[in-house]
Image (cartoon, helix red, strand yellow):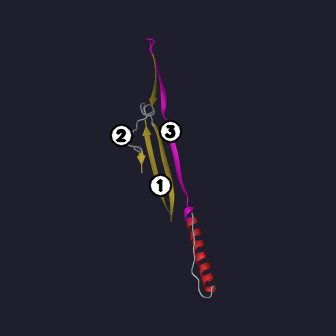
Amino acid sequence: MHIEVTYNQRSSTGLESDVNYKRKLIVVAAAVVASGAAHAQSSSVTLYGVIDVGLDFTNNSGGKQLFKMQDGTYDGMYGSRWGLKGEEDLGGGLKAVFKLENGFNLNNGTLGQGGREFGREGG
């Protein structure tokens, strides 16, 4: 934060001008302290994610083998995802809360939930 105070007024005595200047300086200092207190309210943002992938190995009696990487959604699990969640204290007992979550297929990078960026959860 940058605050600049300029005072160019002069009176005939000079004394009155100094008193007014000091008063204004005190008001500005109080405003700076108050704005710092407002910015000191708590806020947080968390980046999180889950990589849900598995490796399937099939060995049948015909002598053939198959290795295949499976995304977690294939086997009914939860699937890979990343998201942001957080909150901001608005003061007066109020706070704003948000959560944005993206699902994706690790095998090919496509978005889940119909191609929507935050289709898993957004709010």
Give the amino acid type for the residue marked by disc 3 in the picture. Answer: Val
Q: Is residue 28 left or right of residue 85?
A: right
The reply to whether the C-beta atoms of the residues labelled 2 and 1 are less than 8 Å apart is: no
Q: Earlier in the sequence, mark 2 or mark 3?
A: 3
Q: Amino acid at mark 1?
A: Val
Residue visible at 45% across and 12% down?
Answer: 63
Left or right, residue 15 beside residue 103: right
Q: Residue drawn 41% across and 48% down?
A: 122
Report, in whole angstroms, how far the alpha carbon at label 2 lies from the one at label 3.
Answer: 19 Å
Give the residue at the far left of this rendering. Answer: 114
Residue type for callout 2: Gly
Residue, disc 2: 114
Q: Position of residue 72 (x, y in %)?
A: 45, 33
SS category of the residue bearing label 3: strand
In the picture shown, does residue 84 fall above or below 42? above
* Quarter of the picture holding the N terminus: bottom right
Q: Are marks 2 and 3 in contact (CB under 8 Å)?
A: no
What is the magenta range? Answer: 37-64
Q: Residues within 10 Å of mark 1 (few under 14, many from 20)?
A: some
Place residue 117 in its image quadrant: top left
Q: Quadrant of residue 104?
A: top left
Task: Check disc 1 and report the residue beneath it.
Answer: 97
* Res 50 label: 3
Return the disc, 3 or 1, that comes first in the chain's sequence.
3
Q: Which mark is residue 76?
A: none
Magenta-colored stretch includes residue 100: no
- Residues tagged 3 and 1 counted as in contact (Cβ below 8 A): no
Residue lying at 48% horizontally and 26% vertically, measured from the top left: 55
Distance from disc 3 to disc 1, alpha carbons, whole Å, reads 21 Å
Going from N to C along the chain, the mark reached first, 2 or 1, is 1
Q: Nearer the viewer, mark 2 or mark 1?
A: 2
Q: Position of residue 43 (x, y in %)?
A: 54, 56
